Amino acid sequence: MKDASKFIAVREMEISDIDLLANYWYESSHEHLKSMGADKNLLPAYKDFCKMLKTQIQYPYQKKQAYALIWMFKGEAIGHCNVNQIVFERKAYMHLHLWESKSRKRGMGTALVKQSLPYFFENLKLEELFCEPFALNHAPNNLLKSMGFTYLKEHITKPGNINYIQPVKLWVLKKAQYLERMV
């Protein structure tokens, strides 16, 4: 979809979005989660996950440990972008998720990420934004490269609580690069 950017929007996650985001994780197939390096068996209890999201939404930016945005297409929520491992005024790690296969591979990712970056850099006052996708998941790695993120390395790690040990590619976008791209 060449001109998807005129139909997309990004906004901060609200409490009314919690079930949408949680359902993405808990209703996704084992295969889909595995394709991005996640293990369904490692998800916390649904109610605990929802409670964590609600708490993070209510925290001021300086106290957030996780910060999520909702990705919209033609007024409908289709995914989310979030950061965690936040060190306010320094760095965070970004994650990209389109919830349904019909939304993937349509050329919207670049525009969605571009609209997400100001939320992270400006609200969290970041100097660096990292992204560490599963090395075998080509879509996010290609997107990061096309957006001007700098490739740092490929390594083996367990990137999060719901992930298994896996090869990942580490990318970074520094504040100066972000400001240059936004002009």
Image: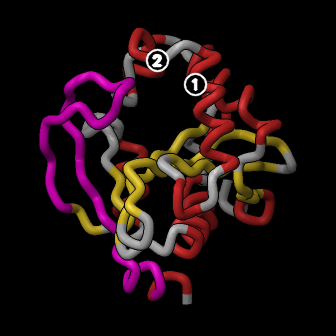
Residue 115 visible (yes or no):
yes
Q: How many marks?
A: 2
Tell me if residue 111 is in the magenta stretch. no
- Of 52 and 151, which appears nearest the observer? 52
> Which label sits in the foreground, 1 or 2?
1
What stretch of residues is rendered in magenta?
Answer: 152-179
| Location of residue 8 in the rendering, given as x and y in whole percent from the top left corner | 75, 57
Residue at 58% from the left image edge and 24% from the top image edge: 49
Give yes or no for residue 154 being in the magenta stretch: yes
Q: Is residue 70 visible?
A: no
Image coordinates of residue 36 in percent, x first then y, are 39, 30
x 59%, y 70%: residue: 123
Q: Amino acid at mark 1?
A: Phe
Q: Amino acid at mark 2?
A: Leu
Element type at mark 2: loop
Task: Point out residue 7 in the picture as x, y percentages from the top left corner.
Answer: 80, 58
Q: In this view of the protein, which residue sits in the foreground, 18 or 118?
A: 18
Q: Which residue is mark 2?
A: 43
CB under 8 Å between discs 1 and 2 = yes
Residue of label 1: 49
User: Circle 2: is it few (<14), some (14-19), or many (20+) Cα within 10 Å?
Assistant: some
